[in-house]
Image (spheres, rainbow, N blue to C red):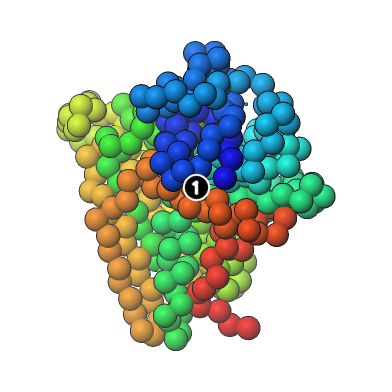
Amino acid sequence: MRFAVYGLGPIGALISKVAIARGYEPIAAIDIDPSKVGRDLGEVIGIGEKMGTQVSGDPRVLYEVKPDLVFHATGTWFHSIYRQLVHAIDSGADVVSTCETLSYPYYRYPELSNLLDEYAKTRGVTVLGTGINPGFLLDSLPAFMTTSMAILEEIVAVRSLDASKRRAPFQKKIGVNMDPGEYKQALASGKLTGHVGFAESVLLISRIAGLDVDRVEEGQEPIVADESISVNGVEVEKGKVIGVVGFGKGFVEDKEVIRIGMKAGIGFEDYEEIKLLGEPEITWRSTGTHGDLGTAAVIVNMAPRVLDHQPGLVTMADLVKAGYHIV
Ligand SMILES: NC(=O)c1ccc[n+]([C@@H]2O[C@H](COP(=O)([O-])OP(=O)(O)OC[C@H]3O[C@@H](n4cnc5c(N)ncnc54)[C@H](OP(=O)(O)O)[C@@H]3O)[C@@H](O)[C@H]2O)c1
């Protein structure tokens, strides 16, 4: 597979490394950061060898090299990456993107989703938004696990993670070391995002497990450090934001059938826990999944499936083919 990477922050760099290690060939790299443009991809992602592919600031490079697939990792909001996706589609490439709101785009962007779906179909390409979360841990994974339920009443999935092990942009978006009031304002104004994707995950579960959720709720708030701490070189002062806690809920006729939660903060325990209520009841717990490498892995692992899929804007619900389902 000949691929391009669009966005070379920590996640785009990791995706490139995982893809190159798989034997896929990088033929283009795009970023707007002037400190990266013009340099060799291998140097920018720090793999200690040149790849012979220079980072370009102009996405039209895609039209010249015509990759099979574009790995896209520049932003969270579908409306602000729409033009970037169109560049990739115009080059004839399939796309796998880390954009959180693209993981279930019909929730926040129904019109834009229909537009992109039509456009991708006319160009014969497939576009998928996914990642570790949203995309896998709190949606595809619990939904897939419902396959072994004879009667499914409720799905509860929780993720807790130590943000000291995550990349700097992640620590920034969850408000680490900010004044709690300032962080709440930054969340409300959209200046910082916290975690985006609770509603998307709930709706992915609903689609995969056939639950027909008719209402979604989501929310998040900062957690304040009750003492000064230092973990893995990250210091947080007492009274400042140490992390964030949030939830997503899905209802069918006012009955809560899906509840997901996430806690991310400096020094927090790493685990995922999934409880499936009904018959038979299941509780599954892990020791945690590294979110950055996990994201790169999900993105690269979905690439062959996207290449094989029929054209259009798809979600993990089109690709995860098992789960509880009433016809
Ligand atoms: N679904 C998931 O599970 C998941 C997991 C991890 C990350 N993500 C998302 O994936 C994205 C990438 O993460 P990250 O931490 O690597 O973010 P990041 O540090 O913001 O990196 C994004 C890179 O893309 C560049 N960029 C921004 N706009 C661009 C444009 N129009 N054209 C070309 N390049 C552009 C940025 O340049 P500048 O720095 O100059 O702006 C930066 O180099 C984020 O939106 C993140 O929220 C999703």
Residue at 52% over, 73% down = 322
Judge whether residue 205 can be spotted in this image: yes
Residue at 50% over, 16% down = 39
Residue 93: x percent and y percent?
68, 42
Residue 246: x percent and y percent?
41, 48
Outermost residue to the right: 122
Residue 5: x percent and y percent?
55, 34
Q: Dividing the picture into quarters, in which one does residue 227 lie? A: top left
Judge whether residue 250 can be spotted in this image: no
Quadrant including the N terminus: top right
Please, what is the three-letter code of the amino acid marked with disc 1? Ile
Residue at 56% over, 54% down = 304
Residue 100: x percent and y percent?
54, 44
Q: Dividing the picture into quarters, in which one does residue 319 lie? A: bottom right
Q: Nearer the viewer, residue 22 or 60?
A: 22
Residue at 35% over, 70% down = 275
Mark 1 — residue?
Answer: 299
Q: Nearer the viewer, residue 234 or 187?
A: 234
Badge 1 crowding class, 10 Å Cα cut-off, few under 14, some 14 to 19, many 20 or more, is many
